[in-house]
Amino acid sequence: MSVRIERRLEQPRWLGVAVPTGSIVLALLLTGAVLLLTGHDPVHAYHRLFNAAFVGKDALTQTIVSATPLAFTGLAAAAAFRMQLFNIGAEGQLYFGAIFAAAAGLYLHSWPSALLIAAMVVAGAFGGAAWAAIPGVLRAFCRTNEIITSLMLNYVAALILNYLIFDSLSYWRDTSTPEAKVFPQGKLLPDAANWPSWGIVHSGPGLVIPLGFGVAVLVAVGLWALYSRTRFGFEVQVLGDSWRAARYAGIRTRRKILAVMCLSGAIAGIGGASQDGDFRHLLDPRGLQQAGYGYAGIVIAALARYNPFAVVLISLLLGGLQNAGYALQGADFPSGLVGVMEGLILFCALGCELLRRYRVRVVRRAGPEPSVPATEPTS
Amino acid sequence: MNNGIVVVVAASGVLYGTPLLFAALGELLAERSGVLNLGVEGMMLVGAVMGFWTVQRVHGNSALVLTAAIFVAALAGAVIALIHAFLVVTLRANQIVSGLAVTIFAGAAGLSSYLGNDLNLADKPARHAFDNISPFGLEKLPLAGPILFGQPLLVYISWACVILIALYLSRTRPGLNVRAVGESPAAADAMGINVAGYRYAHTIVGGAFAGVGGACFSLSITPQWVDGLTQGAGWIAIALVIFAFWRPELCLVGAYFFGAFSALPFTLQARGVTIAPELFQALPYVATVVVLVIVSMGWTKRGLGAPAALGTPYVREEL
Amino acid sequence: MSEPASTPPAVRLRGITKRFPGVVANDAVDFEAAAGEVHALLGENGAGKTTLSNVMTGLYRPDEGSIELFGRPVEFRSPRDALDAGISMVHQHFRLVGAFTVAENVVLGDHRGEARTFRLHPRRIERRVAELGEQFGLAVDPGAKIWQLSLGEQQRVEILKALYRESRVLILDEPTAVLTPQEAEKLFVTLRSMADDGRTIVFISHKLNEVKAVARRVTVLRGGRSVATAPTADATPQSLAELMVGRELASTRPERVELTAEDETVLEVEDLWADGDRGEKALRGVSLHVRAGEILAVAGVAGNGQRELAEAITGLRPPTRGRISVRGKRLPAGDPRRAIRAGIAHVPEDRLGTGVAPSLTIASNTALKSYRTQGPFLRRRLIRRRADELIRDFDVRGATHATPARQLSGGNLQKVVLGREFSAQPSVLVAASPTRGLDVAAIATVHGHLRDAAADGMAILLISEDLDEILALANRIVVLYEGELAGELDPHGATVNEIGLLMAGGARV
């Protein structure tokens, strides 16, 4: 008897649902094991986690608040990964979106609210796209691997963000009061720059949906349509499968790299704009950096297998987890549990991905089997 | 002592560069075998917290406790690296995503924080820490003395590691085999080299190095534990490997260079010069991007030492 | 020259079966080779030769069957077991580390006796490699890096590896594909001297002449089964071919399309220079022209600039100098899209990675060059309909428009590529090794399509390493050697030997 791993010729459709579900269940079991080993009661912890994420007062609303930036960065990662372009710079692109959107919000303070919000979205998208264009240009014209460059630029972006608020007297920094000089923070955006939200459910725990989440859903629809229905999407599909085939087909690969990097950066940048407009109402370096939105977005895109709609769904799930993590922070709830769970979910998803691509077979040696006409595999 | 500012900056460059050096050496071993491990930050943090736990909980003679702490830190880093190795070597998962997952799992908002909190380690001074030693009174040497020889033991150990790894890669059979596995796993496999075995071994040993690098922080530089203690040193270590063209001896130079950059603003501040620290902190990242561009422009067509099979899984029996 | 029955053969395989998902690559194969003989393993592409050799070298583990070496049963869990048992292999795609020196490659993975030392002694190894090279006529500089060597030299390194390890059995998979006929002749001498030294050589090939020239006995594989073993002295190319294909071969050689003087020149290449991947000058001033209805064949040993020539003409590789024009109109350098628009079709050497996007459906791959219709949206229904038409017209077997391209066999895949390229009604076709790796029936189909296209007035540039193919199809033959055209021949008068001399850079016409 031996275990053999074989490539699947066809991937059954039910696996597409079974694999992610199975991996989340497996991750919950593993986290439970970690909790047990360290002397916590897993059932109790999960119960509190679930309540804090989805059931308690304002839980769902807060979950959507946490999910909104994750949906943007998840979509940003999915947009690029589809083309085998590993933009892991959504983190930095989100910062730049936030910087540009805050600038627009402050500078155009006299504009009517609707126009101002639109201007912030455009500015955020532009900021993210501009930051993503750096690794994009380097990849397209110098063939520099975008993984490391986009990663490094995350740190540069974070440092620029800190510099603007903490170590300079920039346009974004509040210098109006003496306290603001001791405890630096960003200028408050005008009221017209506050993005609206809609209360959907008023009874019980309530549910308020911020504009940003709606924009994320629209972006998901747009991304799906772009990638599955247009010539642009077709070219991305070919490039994602084989660069050589794409060149052979006359696809302009450089332009496409740049376009997709900028698209990905723009989506992350709108996420930054939404942070300014929906939730923070000022350029807030600490708040933007604390959650690692960009990296979580990659996790989400990978779990969703780059499907835009699945990205939105999974961002709600991980958003719930993050939200619960904040809500329960305290002496009796283990800190870091959320990261452990996120990591384990991703490990399980990566591991189970094997089941989708390969079939694991237990082979009994020397067993007769009906033979099929042979062709030689070319390795 | 009235040391010039250059000496102070250089000495702190060596001190702050040492955790980078350990982590970069570990990453170098993994990458030379073809495995890209973006989980360095996570492995460092887990190493840091477990090393710190050891000095707080184990009683005995300081030297013994610290030795035990280094081993525990190495072991902790290795265990985390094992997860990555299992995912990418055995299960052929995407190395980038898996590495990021390791950092999320083990990093500042994950296992290291969980352990630090659960073991009640935060914000307490270390019961034992590495003191500065001056071997054979070499510290008295002009210039080089205070820079190189007034340092904690881990600095001297890191030098030994650089020499050993450089010799290992260039002069030994296992070293030749690793390089072959990283360059062309198919060729190595055909010559009877166990590709998966080499990749596992080097990824795990690399994790151990990262764990020791993390312990440099919690046992030597800032002898205490706080969440996210390493502050992105793991990412700089990854950059450093590229910056050093995948060569251990250049890792040493680069680590001290980058270490000096991260220490410079504080040194200057102590002397009353205020320069935005972000400027210096950004330099390692910008420098790495520049080096990457130079490498990829292809002025030397064979690249500058990047293992050809870096980041690609190896599967033998496939249609 | 038969051994006494008591001496067990050097290698004996019994009932080897190896399955892959969906196929049985080896089906109860028996095989035997004696010490001191060159034994050929003959079969079409897809007959299971490579799989069988991978089983012999421990790369694949058989599902059923047993292996004996010198009468002792062995079981290989990995290539290392096979190497330790004395079996070495020269793969079709060499297993060399490009960044290493010759000596480092030779010593790689060695762990016997003296080599058990932890330390490496580069000098000592280089000396030993030089000695072995001299002894068997395999001259290479042991200190040179692999990537600096030609394919022929790299092959010598592969053989040196086996000699260094003192292998008793050496398997070579299609070794002459990268050699000129004259170089092949030299290789045969080396192989025979190794056999006289008591070693066993397993020579894998699908070329009948080679098998007769080098081997003493031959085992024929067909459809994953071993169908016969015979001394080559008793076999004729005819009888071997019939065993290999499993039916009588009609030796039809249809007439070439004859050209008239006024057929216009369609493709014109003047003084073309281009760099290779390593920055070397791969093309040095190539000039050629192809007329409508003509098949111009470019012969040559792999690695003499063929790939660069095809890529430069189709826009995939920007030339450093020179001009390419179609019907008198000059093409911009390095622009595949403009080349397609100018009417240049391309059947690339690398069918699965370049010719199609492997994971995409046949429908998508059919549309690979024709998806640019009006407007930003994809006309999906039209694309599917065209794919169905192509599948019908070109007789693509076992597939619908939704089948991923990677699931097709080589022959069916090439039909998809040809069908797509012809559908654009191009005026020029650049076909690079269009039948490599295909079985006899598929080769005949592809040749038929190429002849028909020429008869319809297409100008075809056929780049091939297969001299039989060139002699069967070409109206004119040019030979590419080290990036230059070494001469032009008329296929009616040319012999394999003449072409071979030009391929080796011997005589210039």
Image (cartoon, helix red, strand yellow):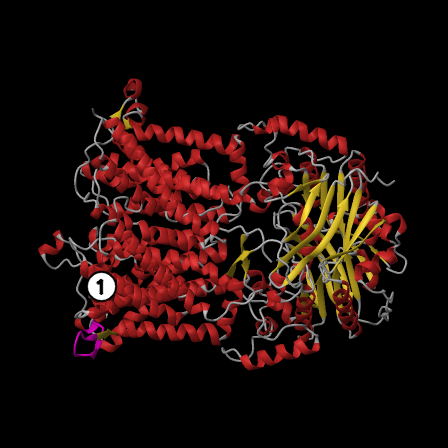
Quadrant in the picture for residue A246: bottom right
Residue at the (25%, 61%) spot, across then down: A322
Quadrant in which residue B194 is drawn: top right
* Amino acid beneath label 1: His
Quadrant, the C terminus of chain A: bottom right
- Residue B283 position, x and y percent, is 34, 45
Magenta stretch contains residue A202: yes
Give the side of residue B254 with respect to residue C15, left or right.
left
Residue C38 visible in rendering: yes
Q: Residue at x 82, y 59 (%)?
A: C243
Residue C182 at x, y percent in the picture: 82, 45
Extent of the magenta region: A192-207
Identify the secondary structure beneath mark 1: helix
Q: Residue C105 location in percent, x, y?
A: 62, 37
Magenta includes C300?
A: no
Q: Which residue is mark 1?
A: A47
Residue A233, image x, y percentages: 48, 71
Number of numbered discs visible in the structure rendering: 1
Tell me: residue C130, above or below residue C498: above
Residue B258 visible? no
State the image quarter where residue C189 is shown. Answer: top right
Chain under label 1? Answer: A
